[in-house]
Amino acid sequence: MSSVKSRDETKARLNLETSRIGWRELQTYYARGHVVRVSPELDLLEVAAELTADNKAQFQHWMSQDQVGDVSPDLARTWYDRDAELWAVVVAPWVLVQDRHDRKLH
């Protein structure tokens, strides 16, 4: 029961630290290789919580499905040219980003 509470507390804290940010503002982090792309099909907070918990098996699964991974140079250029605004959360040293521009929110 305490692990569920701890996980919920982690997600609540991460939710408070999640915000929208322009891709151009993340260029320094991208250049350092610290930006992680999260597919819009995934829950950004769930991914951040799994990273916080160091759940390597889950990350390997997501990576094998191309749901989590590096930002390719082509995608980075597209986001830069579009002046994209992304959802982001920091799990140091990583910045997890998610592009939801094609998805409708409730």
Image (spheres, helix red, strand yellow):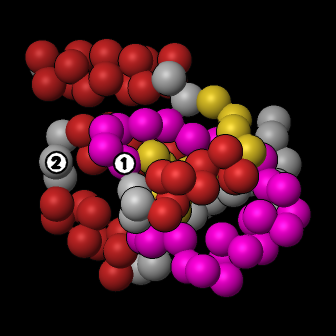
Is residue 4 on the magenta stretch? no
Q: Residue 49 occupies which quadrant of the picture? A: top left
Residue at screen point 31% across, 44% down: 93
Q: Residues within 10 Å of mark 1 (few under 14, many from 20)?
A: some
Disc 2 marks which residue? 54
Q: Looking at the picture, how far across and down is residue 36, in whole percent?
A: 45, 59
Residue extending farthest left: 2
Query: Quadrant of the image for the N terminus?
Result: top left
Residue at screen point 29% across, 72% down: 61
Q: Looking at the picture, how far across and down is residue 68, in whole percent?
A: 43, 66
Q: Looking at the picture, how far across and down is residue 69, in whole percent?
A: 42, 70
Q: Check whether the beta carbons of the residues at disc 2 and disc 1 lie within 8 A of each other.
A: no
Is residue 87 on the magenta stretch? yes
SS assignment at label 1: strand
Given residues 96 and 31, the one toward you in this image is 31
Q: Looking at the picture, how far across and down is residue 9, in whole percent?
A: 31, 16
Q: Real-space Cα distance between discs 2 and 1?
A: 12 Å
Residue at screen point 55% across, 29% down: 18
Residue at screen point 55% across, 79% down: 72
Q: Residues within 10 Å of mark 2 (few under 14, many from 20)?
A: few
Q: How many marks?
A: 2
Q: Which mark is residue 94?
A: 1
Three-letter code for the amino acid on which mark 1 is drawn: Trp
Q: Magenta residues?
A: 69-94
